Image: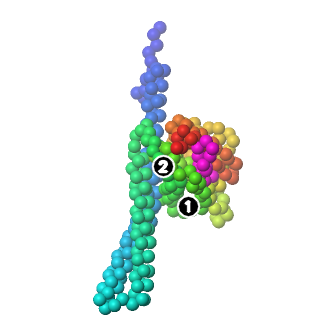
Amino acid sequence: MDVKPQVINGIDLEPDKLVMEIERLHAIMLEQEKLASIGQLTAGILHEIRNPLNFIINFSKISLSLVDDMKEILGKVNDGVTEDDLDELTDIETNLSRNLDKICENGERAMRIMVNMLAQSKEINAEIFEPTNLNQLVDDFLKLAYQGVRGNNSDFNLTMKTSFDKAIGKVNVDAHDLGRAILNIVNNACYAMEDKRKQLPAGTYSPQIEVNTLKTATGFSVSIKDNGTGIPAAVKEKIFKPFFTTKPNNEGTGLGLSMTYDIISKIHKGTLEVNSVDGESTEFIISIPATTAN
């Protein structure tokens, strides 16, 4: 007797076609996860970009005022310049140079933020490896992730401790994907710490995250440790599996850490380890080999 393939809700349950449908839905959910990351970045950018732009505006105004003062002093040349005038002119020149340095520094910071944001809209499979300042990348995405959380929850405050190994210098990585991996890990850390804060009496707990980079004999590593809820042993073995999440249905797709694992292990040929003490802390350690850390 012939058995016709079942079709439920428009989905053909024939094995081969069912596998294709699952792969298609998985790709769609990965795209949605990426869009969620972009949304998180957008919230962070609104806060992060405000500070460097304020620096640019304020130091520009001060510098313009200093230029006017310098012109006034130079205008006295015909009348004879006193020693006090020369000292004041030297001070103005020093301050003007310092302010212009600040303008350049914060302008470049604002530009990096915008470049990182635009880069997140690239195709998932478009890998672009290029020499990248690792410490700057980690610092930028750490701050963006935190400000993104703050954009949705202004009550959340976090102490950040960082230790960046200057010996690392520039590394050959896909900065956009690696940045997304760091963003996902920090987002999860912030979620765990906020969850713990809500469970404890007010004023008894201070969220804290420690981020370190280290040049190793085989490449480099990035460690991200939080003092949140930790991960139970039974859950720890599942966190990198697609669609696994301990968050409520409306708060997570279960693809963030799965995508992060693929970015580190498949794209960068590295490892992603997790150490956790249930109820106390969680530490993720990213290790990238020298083949991509030139």
Pointer 2: what residue?
132
Please name the residue shown 47% across and 34% down the image: 26
- Of 208 and 170, which appears nearest the observer? 170
Is disc 2 placed on a helix, strand or loop? strand
Q: Is residue 107 left or right of residue 230?
A: left
Q: Position of residue 133 (x, y in %)?
A: 50, 52
The colour mode here is: rainbow
Q: CA distance from mark 1 to mark 2?
A: 31 Å
Q: Is residue 259 left or right of residue 237?
A: left
Q: Position of residue 270 (x, y in %)?
A: 57, 39
Pointer 1: what residue?
156
Over which residues does the magenta segment extend?
Answer: 212-225
Please name the residue shown 54% across and 43% down the image: 293
Amino acid type at mark 1 = Phe
Q: Is residue 105 left or right of residue 78?
A: right
User: Can you say whether 72 is above or below 226 in the image?
Assistant: below
Please name the residue shown 32% across and 87% down the image: 77
